[in-house]
Amino acid sequence: MAATPPAEPNRPSPNTVMRALRGDRSPGEFAMAVRRAAREIGEHVSCDARYVGRVESGEIRCPNYAYERVFRHMWPDRSLTELGFSPRTAVRRRSADGGGEPVPPPFHPQFPPLPAPRSPLSTQLPYAASPYAEPPPPDGPLLSRPAAPLRGPAGPHHFDEENDDVRRRTFLAGGSAALATVIGIDPPAEAATAPPAHTASFPAAPGAGKSAAGAFIPAQPRPGAGRFDAGPALFDPGSTFVPGRPGPVPPPRKVGAAEVLGVEQAVREIRLADDAHGADALYERAGQSLRTAYVLLNEGDYNAETERRLQAGAGELAISVGWLAHDSNRLADARSLYAEALATARMAGDAALEAHVFCNSAFLARDAGRPREALRAAQAGQAAARNLDSDRLLSLLAMREAGGWALLQDRSGCERALARAYRLFDRGPSEADPEWMSFFGEAEIAGLQSQCWSALGDWDRASEQAGLAITLQEPRFVRNRVLYTAELAHDRLGRGDLAGAAHHGTAAVALFGEVRSARIRSMLADTADRLRPHRGVPEVGRFLVDYDLAAAA
């Protein structure tokens, strides 16, 4: 008698209930219905045909909490088990025959409240990473926080892929409410009564101002201004729209000089705010502006000149938001946003935008520990900038190249790039210099040189250049002043000067009430951790007291 093959306990059982509920709709149509149902209750899930397939195959035995709420909204008379899923407690426990205690669910930080309503065409917007991958930093000068769980092979093996899908795909899912708030366009009446988004957005229209607290206030609606109709799918309660079926496409809104000026002004406001305050408090507000720019670009009606300016503005905005992601230690998000900007630059044939993307990408790659990529990006940026007649831009790109060589411990390559950068810098500014390079002066080039010497372990030169950068820095660049001070504390510690490191660390802590930058916080936290064994030194003890008080505030 033939032996019975052993059972396959890990093989999932198909979810026939969910397959039956899909009916004759394609997986893509069903996914669209799920996304729309999520929006109806203020949730945001990134359901696609692949996710539907995983559900129906039984690979997803129990959905995460966001999907559970959406499914319960779609089928309020059914429980999860009646929808064909396993009970959550069963999924979270070890198998019965293996014994053991319940396995605790993996940790996932809560998502912040989502900006409301999204455009029905939002799935056509470019891909970028999600700003909801981490909760926003708490108010106040918090200097350290627990590291986020690692992703990928080195991270927890229980990491929830469903939630990760949501985080990766949702960033540019904004819509007409953002459009009205950020650009100053007269919104539909229904949108005006919707709950406000949890964060304010940057203005971009004449008449915008600031509140007493310094928050940006959008301009008042202009009489007779055109309306950006988001269509009945989101705003018309009496619509006959059927979830899961393609809805009517809203007529394109005429986009002209006023809207383009709005996008360009948003870029300027973001840069000015970052110079003064750092990235942490700005990232999500800036992301709202970026989503708006792509709504205009993808759904508007404009002439060729407006298209050129709108592409450039959207690309610059993507770079600005990418930098905010970088400075707030969301490196994967920054990489994705720079990819968006590069795609926009290539499609527009915009060499200046391309050079800017490569400049920022080189800096990001260096900070992410990818020196070869930093070198390639810096060299590609120099090639793109070759015919732009801006020696200062070429100088900055040469400094980015020097940073890559330094991280590779190639001192001669670094020194050659530094010499080229200073030679180009000494030629002076020109009218062709990009507007975004306002930060690149004598203080910044000294600060970047300091970073190179620090990477090479030349602490004397690093300290000298960091001190010079602090001395030369203009008062309006508060964030950079904190950065150079934190770097000087690090460099003094590298020299073995404990008192000097503590002195400059204390100065950086004193400035942290004005600046929120996770990148700078992590730098200062590292210095504090390395000084703790030496708290017997009076200056070190005072620094650690100040640091710990600020971290606990």
Image: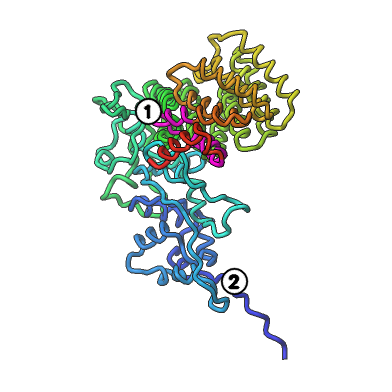
Numbered disc in front, either 2 or 1: 2
Q: What stretch is highlighted in magenta?
A: 506-533
Q: In this orientation, which residue lies closer to the viewer: 336 or 500?
A: 500
Residue 46 placed where, x, y %? 46, 51
Query: Residue placed at 42% from the left, 23% from the top?
Result: 272
Q: Which colour scheme is used?
A: rainbow
Quadrant in which residue 198 is drawn:
top left
* Residue 401 drawn above or below residue 550: above
Q: Which amino acid does label 2 sit on?
A: Asn
Q: Is residue 267 visible?
A: yes
Q: In this orientation, which residue lies closer to the viewer: 135 or 503?
A: 503
Local secondary structure at mark 2: loop
150 inside magenta stretch: no
Give me the C-alpha separation between circle 2 and circle 1: 55 Å
- The residue that mark 2 highlights is 10
530 inside magenta stretch: yes
Residue 549 placed where, x, y %? 40, 39
Query: Residue placed at 42% from the left, 29% from the top?
Result: 510
Neighbour tally class for label 1: few under 14, some 14-19, many 20 plus, Cα within 10 Å: some
